[in-house]
Image (spheres, rainbow, N blue to C red):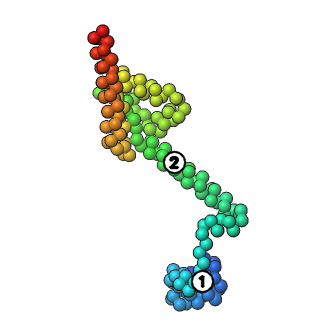
Amino acid sequence: MDHFEMTEKLREKADVTYEEAKAALENSDWDLLEAIVYLENKGKIHHTSSNEQKETEPMNAKNGDTLGSMFQNIGAFIGKMVEKGNRNVMEVHRRNKIVLTLPLTVLVLMVIFFWVTIPAIIVSLFFGFRYRFSGTDISPKVNDAMDSVANKAEGFKDNLRRKDDSE
């Protein structure tokens, strides 16, 4: 970048005159960052808060870009979640054998669109099914919690059997 381009860039960024920008760059051996610090120390750069800037900016294409980037960020987030959901799975076990393996993305979609999924999972615990999660993003604590829930269901079922046998 030549001296003229650097001066123009500093003038635009710092909102100073061409002469002030050139003097700051010459004073700082044409180092753009040092020139900004120099102008700031001289009190030539005035910072505006983001609220003040929003109030003075007219609605233009720049604001549209912000909306577009927001949608882009949301899309990227959803993409990462789907990728993570496909990388991790829920395994359904019965009698120490894997009966079914589902990517978490499928499980989430089932829970969202089929309300009966959660009650079916709960009821299946009483029929000896157990659930485990595996994958790169799964904490061992999740499976400890799932084992605890399955053990509670087994205990509840055993208590019902004992009450039925005693009657």
Residue at image coords 34%, 36% = 145
Residue 98 shows in the view: no
Residue 82 shows in the view: yes
Q: What mark, if any, has residue 165 been given in the picture?
A: none
Q: Which image quarter is the C terminus in?
A: top left
Closest to the camera, between mark 2 and mark 1, is 1
Compute the Cα span from label 2 to label 1: 44 Å
Read off the residue under disc 2: 79
Q: What mark, if any, has residue 44 been given in the picture?
A: 1
**Percent coordinates x, y for residue 101 in the rendering:** 40, 32
Residue at image coords 64%, 60% = 65
Name the residue furthest front: 167
Residue 50: name its quadrant: bottom right
> Which element carries disc 2, helix, strand or loop?
helix
> Which element carries disc 1, helix, strand or loop?
loop
| 91 shown above or below 10 | above
| 93 shown above or below 47 | above
Residue at image coords 61%, 87% = 20
Residue 57: name its quadrant: bottom right
| 146 shown above or below 129 | below
Of the residues shown, which amino acid type is indicated by label 1? Lys
Residue at image coords 47%, 39% = 105
> Which numbered disc, 2 or 1, marks the residue that appears first in the sequence?
1
Of the residues shown, which amino acid type is indicated by label 2? Gly
Q: Nearer the viewer, residue 111 or 4?
A: 111
